[in-house]
Image: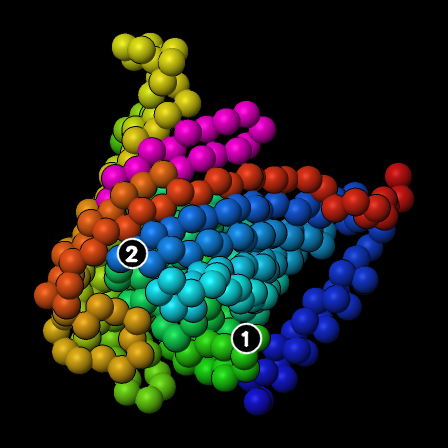
Amino acid sequence: MRCSRSLYFLVSLLLIAVGAVPAQAQDLVPVISGAAGFIYTKDAGQTSLQPILSPVVLIPLGPKLLVESNVEMQGFVARSSPGGPYEGQYFFSVGYLQLDYVVNSHLTIVGGRFLPPFNIFSERVGPIWIQNFQDGPIIYPIGTRSSGLSDGGMIRGVVASRPGWLLNYAAFFSARSNSSAFSAGRAAGARAGLFLPKANFEFGASFERFLQDHHYNSYGGYFVWQPTTHVDVKAEYAHSPQGHGYWIEGAYRFRESDPLGHALKNIQPVVRGQQFYRLAPGVNDALPQADTQRVDFGLNYYLPHEVRVNGSYGRQFSSTGNSNNWTLDITYRFLFPVPFWPKGAQ
């Protein structure tokens, strides 16, 4: 309850900060970004339909302060029983709601509700308009318990930058919250990454200490490689006392110079492989209860006006049962300034 009250206080403080923006700062117009999507899934014979609206609001409060917020409105429609009628449930959730204070390139201070900086999936791959497969990796729950979001504070920035490399970091602390709207686990952790611009290659490592109920450590690593603008390879490894595993994903966007490139330039084949190994029983850890392997194949087709159609097939292997997964989705990416925003003094 105490943490919940703190978050409500933070929301009020953010609203006051927006209202107190000097007129000169109001020339920095806020923007609304995000995506709308519709996902059809047939997983192990069970069909579901999911309409999603996920807007992101960015409100600059002068050159040093930025408010970032994301909410998600999602429906889930499926049969209540085999052969039964389709029934729908609808959810509204607050993703992140944070205030960023940019001190300089070496330090940004973040307060509020934010994505925990464990590996890269949550921050860089998770949004529906970015990820190539709409179901997240098997190992995603490692390092993101208990809700995939953190309530507290974070610092991040660049330790040092040279022509041949750049070292970045992030460190955070999250308080425990049982609020239905702002649930989070008590944890602390850090991530460091090294980017090599000439190779367009980044690799890094993450650590998290879970500080409620049974305390334990999680750690992981990642890499991202884009040797050309048409090739994208990324991977993660994560380990916890309950289990460990990895995923690796590759995508190739056809070029007009390729054979049949003029006809295939809007197509992007993608493939992902992943494995998980159960080390110990877990309670509500959202991980498979047995060793699991999975491979996914998909195609992205890019239409005009920021519309993308994606289809994928996955096959999962486990001692608890093998299954097929079919997914078809369409997403529309949008970006526009906040309407009717007051203009500052000229």
Residue 128 % position (x, y): 46, 48
Q: Which mark is residue 45?
A: 2
Could you tell me which residue is drawn at 35 percent across and 65 percent down?
82
> Where is mark 1, residue-wise?
182
Mark 2 Cα within 10 Å, few/some/many (few <14, many 20+)? Answer: few
Look at 36% across and 38% down and name the residue there: 311
Counting residues from the start of the chain, the first of labels 2 and 1 encountered is 2
Residue 148, how many percent across, how many down?
Answer: 42, 67
Residue at screen point 55% across, 32% down: 306
Q: Secondary structure at mark 2?
A: loop
Question: Was residue 301 drawn as part of the magenta stretch in this picture?
Answer: yes
Of 94 and 26, the residue lying toward us = 94
User: With 248 as the anchor, is 125 left or right in this view?
Assistant: right
Note whether residue 247 is visible.
no
Judge whether residue 31 can be spotted in this image: yes
Which numbered circle lies on residue 287?
none
Q: What's the magenta region?
A: 296-310
Total numbered labels placed on residues in the image: 2
| Magenta: main secondary structure | strand
Q: Are marks 2 and 1 in contact (CB under 8 Å)?
A: no
Point out the frontmost of discs 2 and 1: 2
Crowding at dot 1, Cα within 10 Å, few <14 / some 14-19 / many 20+, comes out as many
Q: Amino acid at mark 2?
A: Gly
Q: Is residue 164 above or below residue 327?
A: above
Q: x, y (%) of residue 140?
A: 31, 61
| Front-lying residue, 286 or 219 | 286
